[in-house]
Amino acid sequence: MNEKEILSTTRRIHDLLSVKRLKEAMAELRPMLAETGASASLEELGQIDTTYRYMLNYTVQGIKDPERQKIYRKIVSDLYELNDRAASSLLTRVSTEYVYVRKRIFRDDPGLESFIQNYLDDSDLLNPDQPEYLRDLSRLFHLVWLTDEYREREVRLVELTRDSKALSVPEKALMVTALNFSLFRYFDKRKFNLLFSFFEQENEEIRQRALIGLLLAFSRYDARLAWYPAIRGRLLVMDENPEFKLLVKEVIMQLIRSRDTDNLSRRMQEEILPEMIRLTPQIRNKLDLDKLLGDSLKDDQNPEWQEIFEDTPGLKDKMQELTEMQMDGDDVFIGTFQNLKGFPFFRHLINWFFPFTLDHPEICSLENSGEFAWMKGFLESVERSFYLCNSDKYSICFGIRSMPADMQKFLSDGLKAEADQLKEMLDDDKLIDPLQQSRRVIRQYTQDLYRFFRLYPDRQGFDDFFGWKLDFYRKDFYRDLFRGDTKSLYAIAGFYLQKKNYREAAEAFGVLEQAGDMSAEVLQKSGFAWQKTGNFQKALDYYLKADLMLPENIWNLKKIGLCYRYLKQPDNALQYYRQAELFDSEDLSTQVSIGHCLLDLQNFEEALRSYFKVEYLSPENTKVWRPIAWCSFVLGKFDQARKYYDKLLEKEPTHFDLINLGHLEWCQGSREAALERYRQSMNNGAIDMDEFISLFDADREQLVRHGVDADDIPIMLDQLRYLTIG
């Protein structure tokens, strides 16, 4: 079998098992196992088949067996595991995917067995002062990551790592990442149990890495875990601790935040940084930068900002917004640091996941080089930095050496100022937020992982879970975990909405609705989320339900009207906009919407009144001139129509305006002027002749009604073709 056949057969077996078609699954699995040459696995499949046949016979005969469900669960789980085993065995032989290439290389490492045995005999052998330290740490990482099924030896090895007094927190945290990746790659209940045990450790760096791995694994294997009640049960036992649910919510929200990272990076590169570069001389001359950095962490703004930002309207607001995003946990630095991932340090896989530590051999080498007198203090400031993830901390340490001296000092002083300010701030926050340290680790580790999956040269060989659909709300474990906890469900659904993940928000609010929360606010937010996906019928259904609870809510009435308009029901839309008008007769959006509905209903006289009211309430609103001009034209008020089209010509007329002005010229007898306006509408490739004809045909009835000879229309259009096409 080639790689494609192996993968398709494996998926097919998996799908058959998921719908409980076990006989067909076994028939597909048998030739795969035969190709591996593993006689023990074939024999195991035969035993499973025999057991299943006996169970079927007993069931058909009506024999009661209290153990039947337990036996059935074991049959299904054993078949899943045989399928995994066969696929991995065959892919390791033939696949060119990165992970299988690494498995073959690692398997053939001549020193591997002796290293494992020595480590099992004495796990304290890993010594950062030894030259082979990073090589041995990498071996251990690869062993944990690339082993498919953990036997007693692998379990003992990981437990020794977990319990070692000699190994540091960064080394243990690194092994948790290896365990996470191993579980994402290959299902194994022992890996789940080991991750649970790491979560029970005291250190937050270790605990939160394990929690993130567990939640992603539960999401990945949600359906399959139905056959492993002990694993799901262990998660639910942890749920008895109120802190656990808060941490789960924090992880989910941080993963949702990560989906905005590319957009944030783009904004930094295209909007913020170019302006900052332009303003750098002014900022350096006009501001006390240390004070600026400190003040940015508090509520008050530096009063000198106003002068700096006068030439760049909107930049201050953008920077303030980005500062708030950073404080909330959004990843605003990836674009800044992505060009600093080319150092030799990042060629080694393990360094992407190493918690920042001054004890890392390469950081020690940097500190001891004597190249810069200020390096030791700088490294300590980097270590204390709250906002930089571990990966970016390493980047800045290696990158600062090649910066100009003034930039080195600026960066070093800035980081020290930030660290000093944050220490005081965070010490105060600990009294308010006992989970502060947990949140920091969750944020930094998620950002480390995001950088790996976006910037590591061989990232294509890994299953990027940031590309998974983060629909936790669909998962059984999520529903079990938050059963009855509508407050947490509401917070997560609302966070999807806040981050503009509208499809997920709509579905997450649906889970909340199923949990019994039918409040008007939930119904409105469900409606809004569906509206933003373009599903106006579903949105309308929710808005109408909310209207039963809040019949006089202006926002809701207007949303109902909007949905009816998009559903091509202007009469119903008008009814709800009129209701909204009763509560606020001077609301511009309501008046505009009423005008649009009347226009759709071809009640041009009433529509014109609404548009004039909008113009009266908002004289600076030039967009209302367009519907005023059109309604005036349709009603035969040509002088009034010309007045508004002339106003539009002084602004930036659209091709629609020019076409409509051509209609007006023709109806007033100026054929040549009409022809010129039509030609102008197609200038600069705004529209082509086919698009023009389509727009023209929609207005043909109005032209004839106002005296244009229908027989002249084809002649005018042909003349236009000669002018524009030749």
Image: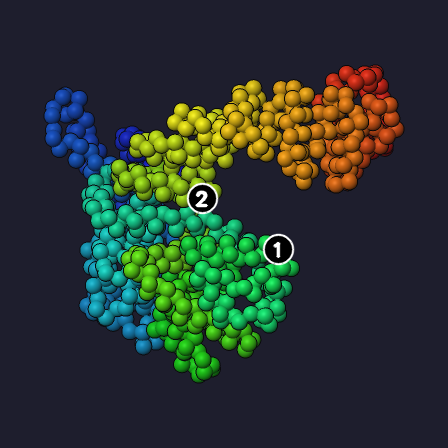
- The mark that comes first in sequence, 1 or 2, is 1
The residue lying at 82 percent from left, 18 percent from top is 708
Front residue (pair 331, 138): 331
Which quadrant would the C terminus be assigned to in this image?
top right
Q: Could you tell me residue 110's position as x and y percent?
A: 32, 66
Residue that label 1 marks: 313
Residue that label 2 marks: 498
**How many residues crowd mark 2 within 10 Å: few (<14), some (14–19), many (20+)?**
few
Q: Could you tell me residue 642's position as x and y percent?
A: 79, 30
SS at mark 2 in the image: helix
The residue lying at 44 percent from left, 46 percent from top is 467
Q: Could you tell me residue 141's position as x and y percent?
A: 32, 61
Amino acid carrying label 1: it is: Pro
Query: How far is the residue under mark 1 from the one under mark 2?
Result: 25 Å
Amino acid carrying label 2: it is: Gln
Front residue (pair 138, 214): 214
**How many residues crowd mark 1 within 10 Å: few (<14), some (14–19), many (20+)?**
few
**In the image: residue 569, left or right of residue 121:** right
**In the image: residue 58, left or right of residue 343:** left
The residue lying at 64 percent from left, 30 percent from top is 613
Q: Could you tell me residue 682's position as x and y percent?
A: 77, 35
Q: How many marks?
A: 2
